[in-house]
Image (cartoon, rainbow, N blue to C red):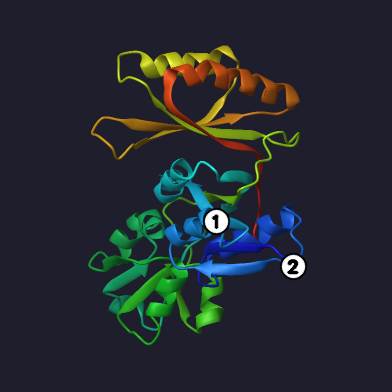
Amino acid sequence: MRKQVAYLGPKGTYAEKAAHILSKLANFQTPIFVPCNGLHSVIKSIAYNNCDAAVVPIENSVEGGVTATLDALWKFPEIFINKAIVLPIKHALISDGELSNISEVLSHPQALAQCSEWLSENIPNAIPLPTNSTSEAVNMVKGSKFRAAIGSKSLIQIEGLKELAFPINDVPGNCTRFVLLSKESNSNSNSANITSFAFSLISNKPGALLKAINNIADFGFNMSKIESRPSKRELGEYIIYIDLEINNQNNIKSFLELKNKLKPLCKNFVDFGNYFSENVELD
């Protein structure tokens, strides 16, 4: 049966590229790709069993964690990360008009943030307007001489527009990690090099978080990421997201022991799974 894979659409986004790459790495045979309007729609498609898998951005090297994805993983603990890739991100300024006439710049909020310095230096009076995706932004500027969009160069050919500037991202090494989500856990995978989880603490007392972090250090794990998000229940209550580097079956066994040490300290603990993450170069 062909897998249905949801991603942040429409066509031409980096998410679509990531969906094709991750589906190939997962050995999906002729998958059906389902573009969704907004990250929340992508997450719901897998959470409510409308698709077999979903591809979403989870972290950017400039802007940090993608909050919609992190919040969804906490909200839907039955969803697991199966694979991850890191894609280099190079944004173009795309329009039907000329740079000197641009007064509005449209794009996904992350893309706008990743190009904020360039925009302030080159078109400081242009108003940034957020959209659901870079592809949606490019579609919205067609026929306009005063609007421009930030997106992938591949969108220029799709929409028949022109490139005003490239690359415009503030950091040359800008990259985004995309993850493949499903309801099947591969926690015992021997090829995994990352394990991800999140927890909230039982009490907000001095040293509570330090005690949890010390347990991680005692087992010899290296944290490749630690990030906090508000629980949305009360001010001052946070969820801690952590990625640990793992490299063999012994590490996975140690992580199971670590979980047993951490859980008594936690109000809630969600294991996102063990998975392999790799860097991918685009053509």
Quadrant position of residue 22: bottom right
Residue 204 as seen in the image, left or right of residue 43: left
Pick the residue in front: 255 or 143: 255
Q: Which residue is mark 1?
A: 46
x, y percentage for residue 278?
Answer: 66, 44
Is label 1 in a helix, a strand or a loop?
A: helix
User: Can residue 174 be seen at all in this image of the molecule?
Assistant: no
Q: Residue at x 66, y 28 (%)?
A: 246
x, y percentage for residue 95?
Answer: 40, 78
- Of tags 1 and 2, the one toward the viewer is 1
Rendered image: mark on residue 30: 2
x, y percentage for residue 166?
Answer: 48, 66
Residue lying furthest front: 48
x, y percentage for residue 208?
Answer: 37, 16
Q: Residue at x 58, y 68 (%)?
A: 34
Q: Residue at x 45, y 50 (%)?
A: 171
